[in-house]
Image (cartoon, grey):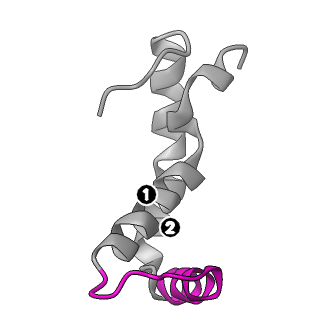
């Protein structure tokens, strides 16, 4: 697709980072050091529901079709 670079919606990792960021923000104690942040991210990554990953993978066809329909512009969800 010629326009895919303009659509962050086509990058599922953005949704994974959002999930991880929300999980970190919801923690009672925020990580203070780089080591604590790395460990917290590893814990949240391991706890990420497989259903989230499956949903992101299964949504890629629809995302690509929508991106083509709006000629690579941002997809409103």
Magenta highlight on residue 14: no
Q: Identify the residue shown where x is 55% and y is 26%.
A: 7
Separation of residues labelled 2 and 1 (CA atoms): 13 Å
Image quadrant where residue 38 sits: bottom right
- Residue 36 position, x and y percent, is 56, 88
Q: Residues within 10 Å of mark 1 (few under 14, many from 20)?
A: few
Give the residue at the far right of this rendering.
2
Could you tell which of marks 2 and 1 lies nearer the N-terminus?
1
**Which residue in the structure is indicated by mark 2?**
53
- Residue 71 position, x and y percent, is 53, 9
In the image, residue 76 above or below residue 57: above
**Which residue in the structure is indicated by mark 1?**
18
Q: Secondary structure at mark 2?
A: helix
- Residue 45 position, x and y percent, is 54, 80
The one nearer the camera, 74 or 20, is 20
The one nearer the camera, 29 or 11, is 29
Q: Identify the residue shown where x is 46% and y is 36%.
A: 62
What span is colored magenta in the figure?
A: 27-46
Image quadrant where residue 27 sits: bottom left
Q: Nearer the viewer, mark 2 or mark 1?
A: 1
């Amino acid at each position: 697709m010629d326009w895919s670079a303009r659509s962050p919606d086509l990058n599922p990792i953005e949704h994974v980072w959002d999930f991880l960021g929300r999980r970190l923000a919801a923690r009672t104690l925020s990580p203070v050091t780089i080591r604590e942040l790395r460990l917290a991210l590893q814990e949240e990554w391991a706890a990420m529901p497989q259903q989230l990953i499956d949903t992101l993978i299964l949504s890629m066809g629809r995302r690509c079709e929508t991106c083509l329909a709006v000629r690579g512009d941002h997809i409103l969800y």
